[in-house]
């Protein structure tokens, strides 16, 4: 028989974590700025129409920020509504103790209906077949009805309000909300604007149809970030803000005319694993895609495309900050590592921190810079930041 011996645990001295030297931050990590999050929350709250509350979108790991850290902090700041893309995301938040209503925006497969009841999630119902499928689960589930007013993604067609009304007859569906989603609120053209207003009219039309039949739907909502920033007069009971709460818009140029200041919450950092010197003509990385044009000092960073760093930033298209100065990415970004040229930063050494998004001395790189250099929007850059990154709230 095996005898288990109890060994005394070594006592560890606790030192207060300093951001870049924290032992928790070994390889590559995300720092979340608590004050920026609170400032964005205040800024967005200042725009809310009367009676409207924020329902932050914390889907996709809170746009890569870390959904539990963000939702906990928002709970602490009085937020009582959240939305996620799927039931599993909602369940993970509940397991972490997140309070309030959690609306699942996407479709849930019958196999995952138990998550809805067990974790008290609110499910979006997009049409009659979704509604009947969920009703036949046979347990009471809170739902918000989704109305398609022109985006043609999810939702029942606003021109078939009788189908929407029929959902109220399904005995196991507890209807606590109804919503639609605007698809051109980020556009500045007259047509974009006209389409937003047409979507709103279509949504109101459905609400008056239901009202006319004595049906009550609880909370009605249609604004996401761009809606709240640029069309707050459209009102509603909830505003499902995602990107703006994280202190960004999808594109830098959209900031012109933004009615409130937004502060980016996330910084992305990585360690220098080592610094080496290449002689003129020597190559580095896969395919030796980089060739040193002269004697160069190259730093190896412990972050790669598996962490969400777009591989399209390879070969000089992206930069990092080391000691406040820009170092270009050279060669091809690898799955777990990235090479940068630090010839102009002689003090760079193994163990130092490189900033990929955020401020460093007098320098700053933003998610806009990264999005522009890789041909996408900030939402994609952020939401693809991977689970291997450590996340800390400062
Ligand atoms: C993602 C999403 C949101 C949040 O959008 P942002 O533009 O990031 O504010 C709101 N509503 C729905 C239905 C969504 O899918």
Image (cartoon, helix red, strand yellow):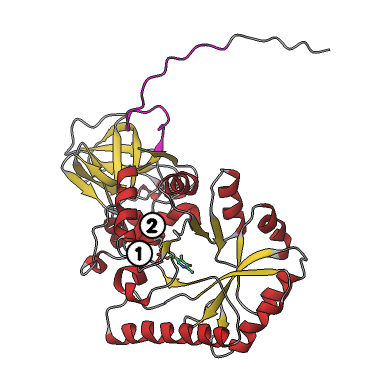
Most foreground residue, 240 or 233: 233
Report the Cα–Cα distance between label 2 and label 1.
7 Å
| Residue 37 seen in render | yes
Q: Position of residue 386 (x, y in %)?
A: 47, 48
Q: Which residues are magenta?
A: 9-28
Residue 159 in which image quadrant? bottom right
Q: How would you rate the neighbour count of disc 2 (Cα within 10 Å): few for under 14, some for 14-19, many for 20 or more?
A: many
Asked if labels 1 and 2 touch by Cβ distance under 8 angstroms, the answer is yes
Q: Residue at x 48, y 54 (%)?
A: 80
Q: Position of residue 262 (x, y in %)?
A: 27, 56
The yes-or-no answer for disc 2 within 8 Å of ligand 1 is no
- Decide whether residue 15 is among the magenta residues: yes
Q: How would you rate the neighbour count of disc 1 (Cα within 10 Å): few for under 14, some for 14-19, many for 20 or more?
A: some
Q: Position of residue 131 (x, y in %)?
A: 68, 74
Circle on res. 377: 1
Q: Quadrant of the C terminus?
A: top left
Magenta segment's dominant SS is loop
In the rendered image, the vertical position of residue 137 relative to residue 340, given as above or below: below
The residue labelled by disc 2 is 381
Q: Position of residue 69 (x, y in %)?
A: 46, 44
Q: Quadrant of the N terminus?
A: top right
Disc 2, SS: helix
| Residue 33 seen in render | no
In the rendered image, the vertical position of residue 319 relative to residue 5, given as above or below: below
């Amino acid at each position: 028989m095996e005898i288990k011996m109890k060994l005394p645990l070594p006592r560890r001295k606790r030192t207060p974590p300093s951001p870049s030297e924290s032992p928790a931050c070994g390889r590559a990590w995300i720092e979340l700025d608590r004050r920026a999050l609170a400032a964005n929350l205040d800024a967005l709250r200042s725009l809310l129409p009367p009676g409207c509350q924020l329902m932050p979108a914390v889907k996709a790991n809170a746009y890569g920020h870390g959904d539990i850290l963000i939702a906990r902090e928002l709970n602490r700041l009085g937020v009582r509504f959240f939305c996620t893309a799927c039931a599993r995301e909602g369940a993970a938040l509940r397991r972490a103790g997140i309070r309030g209503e959690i609306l699942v925006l996407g479709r849930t497969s019958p196999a995952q209906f138990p998550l809805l009841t067990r974790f008290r999630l609110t499910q979006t119902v997009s049409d009659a077949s979704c509604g009947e499928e969920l009703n036949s689960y046979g347990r009471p589930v809170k739902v918000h009805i989704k109305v398609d007013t022109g985006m043609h993604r999810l939702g029942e067609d606003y021109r078939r309000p009788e189908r929407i009304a029929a959902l109220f007859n399904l005995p196991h569906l507890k209807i606590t909300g109804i919503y639609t989603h605007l698809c051109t609120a980020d556009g500045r053209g007259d047509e974009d604007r006209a389409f937003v207003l047409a979507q709103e009219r279509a949504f109101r039309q459905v609400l008056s149809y239901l009202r006319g039949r004595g049906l009550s739907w609880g909370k009605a909502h249609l604004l996401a970030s761009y809606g709240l920033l640029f069309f707050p007069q459209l009102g509603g009971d909830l505003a499902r803000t995602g990107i703006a709460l994280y202190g960004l818009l999808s594109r830098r140029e959209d900031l012109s005319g933004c009615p409130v200041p937004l502060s980016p919450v996330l910084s992305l950092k990585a360690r220098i694993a080592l610094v080496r010197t290449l002689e003129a003509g020597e190559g580095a990385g896969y395919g030796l895609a980089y060739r040193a044009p002269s004697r160069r000092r190259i730093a190896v960073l412990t972050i790669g495309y598996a962490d969400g760093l777009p591989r399209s930033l390879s070969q000089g298209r992206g930069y990092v900050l080391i000691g406040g100065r820009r170092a270009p990415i050279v060669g091809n970004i690898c799955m777990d590592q990235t090479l940068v040229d630090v010839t102009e930063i002689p003090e760079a050494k193994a163990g130092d921190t490189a900033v990929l998004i955020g401020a460093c001395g007098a320098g700053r790189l933003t998610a806009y810079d990264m999005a522009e250099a890789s041909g996408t929007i900030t939402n994609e850059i952020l939401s693809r930041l991977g689970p291997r990154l450590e996340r800390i709230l400062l």
